[in-house]
Amino acid sequence: MSTFEVHICQCPDCQQGDDHPYKKQHRLINLFLSCLNKQQRRLYVAIEAKRIGRGGGKLMSQISGMSNAPICRGLRELDDYLASGVINRTQLSVRGRPRIEKTNPDVRPALEQMLDDEIAGDPMCEQKWVRSSVRHLTKRLREAGHQVSHCTVWRMLKEMGFTLKTCKKKIKPNSDSSERDAQFQYIAAQKQEFTTAGLPIVSVDTKKKELIGHFNTKGKTWRKKAEEVNAYDFPSLAVCRAVPYGIYDVGRNEGFVYVGISADTPEFAVDAIARWWKSEGCAKYPGRSRLLILADSGGCNGCRVRGWKQQLQEKLSDMFGLTVTVCHYPTGCSKYNPVERRLFSHISINWAGKPLKSLDVMLGYIRGTSTKTGLKVKAFLQEGSYKRGQKVTKAEIEELNFQHHSTCPDWNYTVSPHTS
C-alpha cells in the first residue's frame, strides 16, 4: 500500500502547542493538499489565501509549505477567472514536450498521404495492400524519416476522424419495390380470404440444420459448472445432422416440426406437409378442400424449384384431393414468414446454451417450447432417405394441374387435383 508524507504546518500559532484551536484544521488542509496535483494545489491555496485576505498568501505559505511564486501564480489565475468566468486551460495543463505536429509539421500530411494512397489504390495493378494497423503505419512513417510512436499515430488518426470500422450491410440488390409491396398486400388479402372462410393457413420453412452430439450451441444457461462440449464443430464427430422442417398453423397458433436426418429436398418438405395434413389437418379442418401455404422464395420450397411443385401435385393435391394455393414471400423477406418469428425463434431460445446430444433430446426441447400467447409445438422424427439432384423435366411440369395467379405470378400459384 503506497504512503505519502503530510506537510507539518510552520505557522507561529501552531508552533505554540497542541492546544491551538487551528492546529487540527491546518493538519486537515495539508492532508487534503497531499492528495492533489500541482495545479490543483496552487488553485486551492490561492482560494484560501483570497478568503483570508491581507496576509493570506504568507499564512498559506507557512501552512502548506509552498513558496510565494506558485501562490502568486494561483492568485493571478483566480483573478482572471473571477473577471472572465473562464479558466485558462493552457495555464492549468501539465507542461511537457510539445506535440510532434509542432516540431515536425510534415508528419500529419505524410500520414494522410499514406491513407489516401491505400484507399485510392488501383485494383487492376499488381501492387497488393494489407490492412494497415497502427504499428504498420508507424513503421512506414519512421522509414519516411518521421520519428513517432504508435500512440502518437493512434491519436492523430482519432483527431483526423479515422476509427476501426467493419463493413456495413446497406447496399441492397436492385429489386422492384412496387412488386414487393404488391406481393405483401396480396398475401394479406389471401390470408383474410382463407381466414374468413375457415380454411387452413400454414407457414412452412426449414430451420437451421443442427449437428447432433456434444457440440456448442449459442446462448447461456444458469449452471454451477459449464458443460463441456467438443472443441471443434467437425461434422465427422456428429452422430448425424438434423434437418428440422417446420409447419406453423397460423390460425390455431400451433407448430409442428418434422426432423429428418437426410437431405433437405422438396420431397422431404412435401412429405412433412402431407404427414401433417393426414395426422392433424384432416381432423382439425374436416370437409375443407383448400389449403394456403406461405413459404420463402428460396430453399427446398422455393418459387423456382420444379421438384417442389411436382411433389405438391403428386403427394398432396392428388393424394388428398386438396386445392393448394402457395404464396411466396419476396426475395430477401424471409424473416416476414410467420414460421420464422412465431415458431423457430422460440425453439432456438428454448435450447440456447444446451448441447443437442441426441435426436431424442432435440425433439424434447422442441416439444417443450411454449409462449405466453399459448403456442403449442409437436415434434416428430421424419425417417427416410432423400436424394439430392432429382431432375424434373419440362414435360413433367406441363402435365401438372398448375395455374399462376394474375398478381405476381412467379410468387403465387395454385395446384389443383387431377381428379376430385
Image (cartoon, helix red, strand yellow):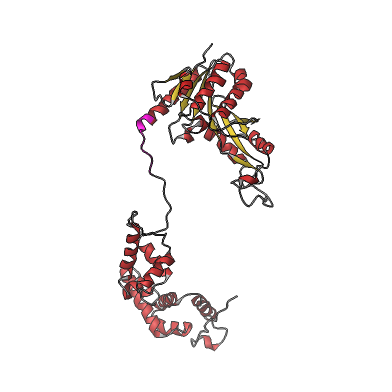
Magenta stretch contains residue 113? no
Image point 57% across, 83% down: which residue? Answer: 19
Q: Is residue 178 above or below residue 157?
A: above
> Farthest residue in the top direction?
420
Name the side, left or right, on which 157 lies relative to 381: left
Seen from the viewer's position, the closer of residues 4 and 160 is: 160
Above/below status of 40 relative to 212: below
Q: Is 317 situated left or right of 410 in this image?
A: right
Q: Position of residue 418 (x, y in %)?
A: 51, 14
Looking at the rendered structure, the number of numbered marks drawn on it comes to 0
| Quadrant in which the N terminus appears | bottom right
Q: Which residues are magenta?
A: 171-179
Q: Does residue 247 appear left or right of residue 188 in this picture? A: right
The answer, for residue 85, to whether it is visible in the render is no
Q: Determine if the magenta segment contains residue 177.
A: yes
Residue 389: x %, y % from top left: 53, 32
